[in-house]
Image (spheres, helix red, strand yellow):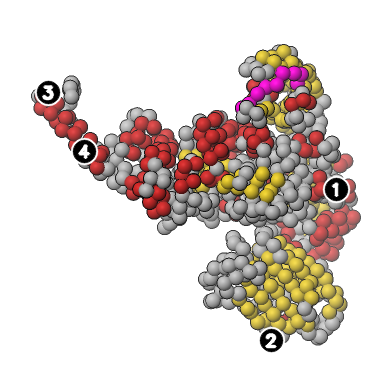
Amino acid sequence: MRIIARGRAPDGRRGQPVAMLAATLLAAAVLTLVTSLAGARPTGDNSCPWVGQKASPARRAHEVLRHMTLDDKIALVHGAGGSAYVGHIPANERLCIPALNLEDGPAGVADGMTGVTQLPAPVAVAASWDPKLAAGYGEVIGSEEAGKGANVNLGPTINIVRDPRWGRAFESFSEDPYLTGELAASEIRAVQHQGVISQVKHYAVYNQETYRNTPQDDAIVSRRAMHEIYLPAFQQAIDEGHVGSIMCSYSTVNGEYACQNRYLLKKVLRNEWGFKGFVTSDWGATHSTVPSARAGLDMEMPDGTYYGSALEQAVEEGQVSEKTLDRMVLHILTQMFRFGLFDHPARGNPDATVTSPAHAKVAREVAEQGSVLLKNEGGLLPLDASRVHSIAVIGPGGGSQAMTSGGGSAQVQAPYVITPYQGISERAGSGVKVRYAEGLYPQGQLPAVPASAFGSGLEVTYYGGTDLSGNPIATGEASNIDYNWKGSSPTSGVPATDWSASWSGTLIPPKTGTYTFSLTSDDGSRLYIDGKELINNWGDHAATTKTARIQLTAGQQVNIRVEYYQAGGDSSLSLGWQVPGSTSPKQQAVELAKKSDVAVVFADKYESEGSDLQDISLGSDQNRLISAIAKANPNTIVVLNTGSAVTMPWIDRVKGVLEAWYPGQEDGNAIAALLFGDVNPSGKLPVTFPKNLAQVPAHTPARWPGVDGKVHYSEGLDVGYRWYDEKNLEPLFPFGYGLSYTTFRLSHLTVTPEKVHTGHKVRIRVRVTNTGSRPGDEVVQVYVADPQRTGEPPRQLRAFEKIHLRPGQSKRVSMSLTRRAFAVWDGSTQTWKVPDGAYRILVGDSSRNLPLEASIQVEGQ
């Protein structure tokens, strides 16, 4: 070994003889080699030389790996308990490896943490069609995650909304892969700019909650549909978002769990896309040790059921090579170095308050820009305070029950909520009388049946071992369960999760007449009176209310029984009634509407992770309320707080409809600004709104939720608007649709060149003019229609641009299409190809309003 020494000696003293210095360096090199081979911590002044080093993240990761024992490696590839974070890998102090803290965050810091900003649901970001706004959204999320001490944000959710019944549609973006990918890439870059790793989810083909994480949710999907519909947004997250991590999903895809699916994880993700980050399982989505490790799953969450001692044993026995384990470790370490986690350890903590007025401003802007004006008959909107002297705000969602967030891992605790009633009252000013009527009991629940109505009380039976369906249950102590209808809460001996029970006794009606009962539960419940089933609310779902009527006689007692089971997640159960002769909230709301110049009705539909919706109706109670208010007041406006599309049987009887999604903590301020025209509505639908459930692409049982353990994606490429176009169906509102308080004209379309070779860009230019009297934003949408022989859908979104214009102003918008806009997945070669032929370029403001058209000739390959 030849050593040439220059400069200072290791201890900083000058003038040490070169020969002595050479000997010192040689001894240090030998010592480092020995400790490396022994797997022990390096010794000396700089015991972790990879900290603060200027070498590449990959090189630094390899250096750490050389000092890791088998136990060190195993500890890095699975989660551990004892942390405030939803996912946690403890620090390795000997090797200076910092802790890795993972926290949910599709809509902001979740998992019950406080002092954070409740942002609008991600679907509102998608409805803005604005990558810059998505970046602002991501900046807030990244900043607050960092402030809480989290260094991995579990988000965004970018799965395609295949069906509006999906319980997580609100936390995803769109039914279109291009729109989803553009917004996701912008958000990811912004999150990661804050030094937080973004873990995009859920890879892949995860589009329903029913049967999730079981073999029954086996998505039978063609590779062409995967590559053209369900995978492109993930590739965009890698290529353009440079995402550091990916979460594999609960789905079974073509017979193999996603987190051990070699085709998805190895062939596509690593070999085709060249992904360099790490792959983490969704919580509990790991189902094996050896197959998962060999397929490419780097990290198991939330614990080490399969990647703890089981993986260590598999490595020792040679079932999993240590080279495979090393690759898993390197994927994780490289990203930790890339994001500076070694050099700049997380300084935040879970108790920190990280929200701010600036973050609240972003929340309000997203709520404003993401709301979609669906109907505005006769120009009723915006409201003019000089002409409108009284406003009735109606519906539970207009008051204290404002639905600002969906449920599950995307649910964020709001530091405050501005209700619509508060926001409208404040904005209207003293010259306008704003009054509120609930119209319905919250979530359709009727007033709780008092304990005194049950005579001597109810006998409670808890089912141990199995639930009412015969499924095994856990045991423990009950908590956070609403027994207000029963009059008291049990305190011991009650299973807390996956449990079931029944309550039975007698009910004594106080009056003679027709009673309405409501039964609300998460999950299943049934109500029996005199042995006959009156309400069946049985099923795995988020809090859902069902009602029924029955004739009862005063003082004549009847037998009553309530059955309940809870299948995981939140637990809730309540029984309510309306006694004959009482004035209903609906009647009160109708009277208020009659006395007001304008009635604004708030209607909602709750979505949550863990369960899918049974239908896309607002429910009979809400629909009846809207119809009754519209009959009482011709100037009725409906504001919808939903996670995706809903049907509107009353649409012809109201003058205005505004889809506001789940608008977050600034709900009332945003709604007021939109209703009064302080902000011009500019949102566009990121999903199609069908007229009825029968129009939905996956409306058959075989497609949703599947039969005999198979979920058939037989609609192929025809997802969302592609289906409606292919089947020539007229939806209620098309993809990309949204009204404004001003008007726009698109003209002077030019597409160059008229003949293009594969690999060259196509330039699209169009003039946009604000022809109205208000400033506003317009979204120019570009769709491509492939030659019919390709088998592609009739037209597909390939570019869009959002532009702001003053009244009378015109601007030239320029967009470009790359090779990918014309490429199709070739099943025979398993590659992307561009077919030769004539392609039509269609430009407009929705998928069904495309007035400008041009043709180009593409020479493909």
Q: Which residue is mark 4?
A: 34
Mark 1 or 2 closer to N-term? 2
- The quarter of the picture where the C terminus appears is top right
Tag 1 and tag 3, C-beta contact below 8 Å:
no
Decide which of 277, 598 is in the foreground and name it.
Answer: 277
Instruction: Bin the neighbour count of mark 3 within 10 Å (Cα to Cα): few under 14, some 14-19, many 20 and up.
Output: some
Decide which of 328, 354 is in the foreground and name it.
Answer: 328
The amino acid type, in three-letter code, at marker 3 is Val
What residue lies at 71% left-to-right and 82% top-to-bottom? 505
- The quarter of the picture where the N terminus appears is top left
Gap between marks 1 and 2, in whole Å? 48 Å
Tag 4 and tag 2, C-beta contact below 8 Å:
no
Q: Quadrant of residue 43?
A: top left
User: Left or right of 582: which side holds 422?
Assistant: left
Looking at the rendered structure, the number of numbered marks drawn on it comes to 4
Q: Which mark is residue 651?
A: 1
Gap between marks 1 and 3, in whole Å? 89 Å
Instruction: Bin the neighbour count of mark 1 within 10 Å (Cα to Cα): few under 14, some 14-19, many 20 and up.
Output: some
Q: Which residue is mark 2?
A: 456
Mark 4 or 2 closer to N-term? 4
In the rendered image, is residue 221 in sight?
Answer: yes
Instruction: Bin the neighbour count of mark 2 within 10 Å (Cα to Cα): few under 14, some 14-19, many 20 and up.
Output: few
Q: Measuring from the top left, give residue 551's x and y in whole percent.
A: 85, 76
Q: Is residue 652 magenta?
A: no
What residue lies at 51% left-to-right and 47% top-to-bottom? 281
Q: Measuring from the top left, give residue 408's x and y in whole percent.
A: 60, 54
Gap between marks 4 and 3, in whole Å? 24 Å
The amino acid type, in three-letter code, at marker 1 is Ile
What residue lies at 57% left-to-right and 72% top-to-bottom? 465
Gap between marks 2 and 3, in whole Å? 97 Å
| In front: label 4 or label 1 | 4
Magenta extent: 831-839
